[in-house]
Image (spheres, grey):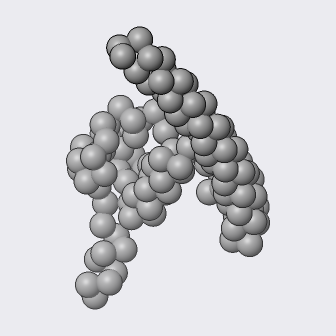
Amino acid sequence: MSKQKNDEEKTYSISELASQLEISPRTIRFYEEKGLMSPNRTPGNQRIYTRKDRGRLKLILRGKRFGFSLDEIAEMIGISEADMNEIDQIEKSLHYGEKKLGEIRRRREELDLLEQDLLEIRDKLLKRLHTLTE
């Protein structure tokens, strides 16, 4: 058997996968409960994760880090539609990405306005303090 074949067949226990991705096994079970993952099971009912499961989990974690909801992540990785092809997946991801970029831009504008307001108040308070302490 070639090395490539061995790499493709590599499996992980829940604790191995959690350790590698620096999350808790409970987090992995939570994503499974939400239908985002469905690992194989041993005859003893232990979860067995493949490289594909590991990749999917990394996508889920990346989506969460970017602030996407679990429903949005499910749509982007094709969980919600069994017949979703790669083009549909990419288009869905682009749609949610553009939406998230818009949210970020709006937040940035709000933070810029808040910063301006706080700087104006600080200047007024410093002037008043200077007046009172002369």
Q: Is residue 13 visible?
A: no
Q: In the rendered image, which quarter contains the N terminus?
A: bottom left
Q: In the rendered image, which quarter contains the C terminus?
A: top left
- List x then y, in percent, for residue 68: 60, 44
Counting every numbered tag in the picture gives 0
Q: Is residue 48 visible?
A: yes
Q: Nearer the viewer, residue 76 or 1?
A: 76
Relative to residue 129, is residue 85 depicted above or below?
A: below
Q: Is residue 100 left or right of residue 65?
A: right
At horizontal 72% and vertical 57% (from top left) the residue drawn is 98
At horizontal 24% and vertical 43% (from top left) the residue drawn is 15
Query: Which residue in the rendered view is the most extreme toward the front?
Result: 134
- List x then y, in percent, for residue 126: 44, 24
At horizontal 31% and vertical 51% (from top left) the residue drawn is 21
At horizontal 47% and vertical 47% (from top left) the residue drawn is 65
Query: Which residue in the rendered view is the most extreme toward the top?
Result: 132
Relative to residue 83, is residue 66 depicted above or below?
A: above
Q: Is residue 33 left or right of residue 75?
A: left
Q: Nearer the viewer, residue 12 or 60?
A: 60
Residue 91 is drawn in which quadrant? Answer: bottom right
- List x then y, in percent, for residue 50: 39, 60
Q: Is residue 110 left or right of residue 59?
A: right
Q: Nearer the viewer, residue 46 or 33?
A: 33
Query: Which residue in the rendered view is the most extreme toward the bottom?
Result: 2
Q: Is residue 23 left or right of residue 29?
A: left
- List x then y, in percent, for residue 20: 25, 53
Q: Nearer the viewer, residue 37 or 108?
A: 108
Relative to residue 4, is residue 94 depicted above or below?
A: above
